[in-house]
């Protein structure tokens, strides 16, 4: 039941003091013509309403949630506590810099830490999401080519294993996308890449996700970036999800010129319904002069103080967002980085990779693994084509079966290169007991597929709603309550 349906006239939770100033009414033309339908409820009913809604959803606090860092890994509570400190919340972006030194220090320390983690020399926190970061990075590459007089460099290579936002961002940046297929191991096909790059002075660069969207680290990564550089292109690293490599391998060392990170994935800040995102962009020195926004620098040469101050890049491409990006997201990410420290960052990656490999190996046999890798990185992709052919049970049916076992389904039908894909990313925080339980459930569901598929077709039966008309919901969404 919606909050509007529970509303009863006259009930409420507000207790405003009597007005002690003159009441001024806007002019008639500015007054609303229809009634304002605010729900009217007692506090207890409102409180129950939200608790009831919470019970209907499955979150990371309810049980295993193998959508991993890419969607929502466990976000330590301390991040929220720090980000709620009044020194961080009660500020204004236009207040004098001498009164905002602490917040500026956060921006600087976050940028510096991200530089160290990625092997870049400069970072901007302005972009508000991963795709926004991609767009920013591509504009940097574009500015670089234009400054060199290379106006014809408008084509960007995007392998078919890329995240869907990559080609979209490239088109937004006014570039033409050249698709390069993966080989049968799910990696970039070097021969095809060489073919595209041969005598092509129109190549602006390459966008790559590594580990790729199938959870595989491309062993030819250095060769790939060399091929692009040899033809005069720039290399962009989609680092939305750094969970597998942070503290172990750096995009900068792999030969990439710029990178974006999703603080709202790897660096544990809630997103989606839970909060705003942040997709900082890092670059090497030759791109730094085009960076957007302002950078926090050690001191202001002109005023000769040792306060932190702001500086704009020489040929800055402008503003990607107002002021300093989603600042509180950076506070949370910096808290996470500082809590883990130099030892904890690589350890988190190590556990994420270990957990994914443990699960993958226990499920091998029952489930076919796409590209059948010996080891995976932070995630692995099951391919249920065999089950679909032999039993009629699809990735969707297994996902629905998981719901009845209090497990959130993994990512379904992605990557697109695998037909009946279930992509699981358990993450570093899950215990062996949780993984063992999830493995048991996956194995039981596979048994059920072969022995009682009809039962799986019925799933889920324990959730507030069962199978939904997903096509109908996508085609005819009802997004507004009609009074
Ligand atoms: C999530 C993701 C993105 C997009 O990030 P948004 O914040 O959703 O815009 C891009 N690339 C990869 C690999 C991702 O996982």
Image (cartoon, rainbow, N blue to C red):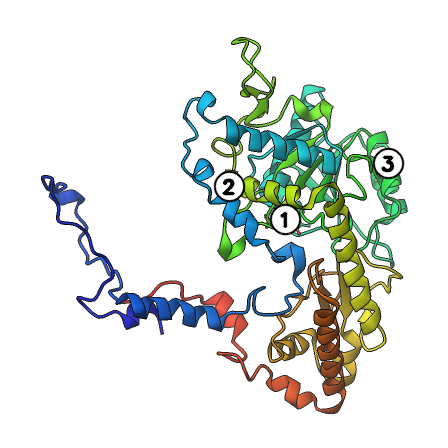
Position of residue 56 measured from the top left corner of the image (x, y, whole percent)? 48, 73
Task: Tell me what residue is drawn at x 54 percent, y 52 percent.
Answer: 271
Tag 1 and tag 2, C-beta contact below 8 Å? no
Closer to the chain start, of discs 1 and 2, is: 1
Position of residue 288 measured from the top left corner of the image (x, y, whole percent)? 67, 24
Q: Which residue is mark 2?
A: 328
Q: Which of the pair 252/31 is nearer the observer?
A: 252
* Above or below: residue 108 compared with residue 402: above
Position of residue 383 measured from the top left corner of the image (x, y, whole percent)? 77, 70
State the image quarter where residue 302 is shown: top right
Closer to the chain start, of discs 3 and 1, is: 1
Q: Is mark 1 within 8 Å of ligand 1?
A: yes
Q: Which residue is mark 3?
A: 227
Position of residue 219 measured from the top left corner of the image (x, y, whole percent)? 88, 48
Q: Which residue is mark 1?
A: 165
Closer to the chain start, of discs 2 and 3, is: 3
Looking at the image, the residue that sits furthest to the left is: 22
């Amino acid at each position: 039941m919606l909050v509007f349906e529970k509303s009863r006239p006259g009930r409420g939770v507000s207790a405003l003091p009597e007005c002690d100033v003159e009441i001024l009414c806007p002019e008639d033309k500015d007054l609303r013509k229809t009634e304002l339908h605010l729900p009217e409820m007692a506090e207890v009913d409102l409180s129950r309403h939200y608790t009831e809604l919470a019970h209907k959803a499955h979150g990371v606090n309810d049980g295993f949630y193998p959508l991993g860092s890419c969607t929502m890994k466990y976000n330590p509570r301390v991040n929220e506590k720090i980000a709620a400190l009044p020194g961080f919340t009660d500020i204004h972006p236009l207040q004098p810099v001498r009164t905002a030194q602490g917040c500026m220090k956060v921006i600087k320390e976050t940028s510096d830490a991200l530089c160290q983690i990625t092997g870049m020399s400069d970072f901007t926190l302005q972009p508000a999401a991963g795709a926004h970061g991609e767009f920013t990075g591509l504009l940097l590459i574009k500015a670089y080519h234009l400054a060199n007089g290379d106006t014809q460099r408008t084509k960007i290579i995007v392998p078919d294993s890329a995240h869907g936002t990559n080609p979209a961002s490239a088109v937004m940046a006014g570039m033409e996308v050249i698709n390069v297929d993966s080989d049968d191991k799910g990696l970039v096909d070097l021969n095809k890449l060489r073919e595209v790059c041969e005598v092509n002075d129109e190549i602006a660069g390459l966008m790559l996700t590594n580990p790729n969207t199938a959870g595989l680290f491309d062993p030819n990564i250095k060769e790939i970036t060399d091929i692009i550089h040899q033809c005069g292109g720039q290399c962009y690293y989609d680092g939305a999800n750094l969970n597998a490599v942070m503290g172990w391998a750096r995009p900068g060392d792999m030969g990439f010129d710029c990178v974006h990170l999703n603080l709202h994935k790897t660096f544990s800040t809630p997103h989606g319904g839970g909060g705003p995102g942040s997709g900082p962009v890092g670059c090497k020195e030759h791109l730094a002069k085009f960076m957007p926004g302002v950078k926090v620098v050690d001191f202001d040469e002109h005023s000769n103080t040792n306060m932190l101050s702001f500086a704009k890049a020489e040929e800055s491409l402008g503003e990607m967002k107002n002021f300093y990006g989603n600042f509180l997201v950076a506070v949370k990410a910096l808290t996470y980085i500082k809590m883990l420290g130099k030892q904890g960052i690589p350890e988190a990656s190590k556990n994420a990779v270990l957990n994914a490999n443990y699960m993958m190996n226990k499920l091998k046999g029952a489930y076919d693994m796409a590209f059948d890798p010996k080891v995976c990185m932070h995630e692995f992709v099951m391919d249920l084509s065999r089950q679909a052919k032999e039993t009629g049970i699809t990735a969707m049916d297994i996902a629905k079966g998981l719901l009845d076992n209090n497990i959130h389904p993994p990512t379904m039908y992605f990557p697109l290169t695998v037909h009946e894909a279930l992509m699981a990313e358990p993450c570093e925080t899950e215990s062996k007991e949780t993984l063992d339980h999830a493995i048991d459930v996956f194995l039981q569901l596979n048994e059920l597929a072969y022995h009682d598929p009809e039962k799986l077709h019925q799933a889920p039966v324990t959730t507030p709603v069962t199978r939904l008309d997903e096509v109908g919901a996508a085609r005819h969404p009802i997004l507004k309550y009609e009074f």
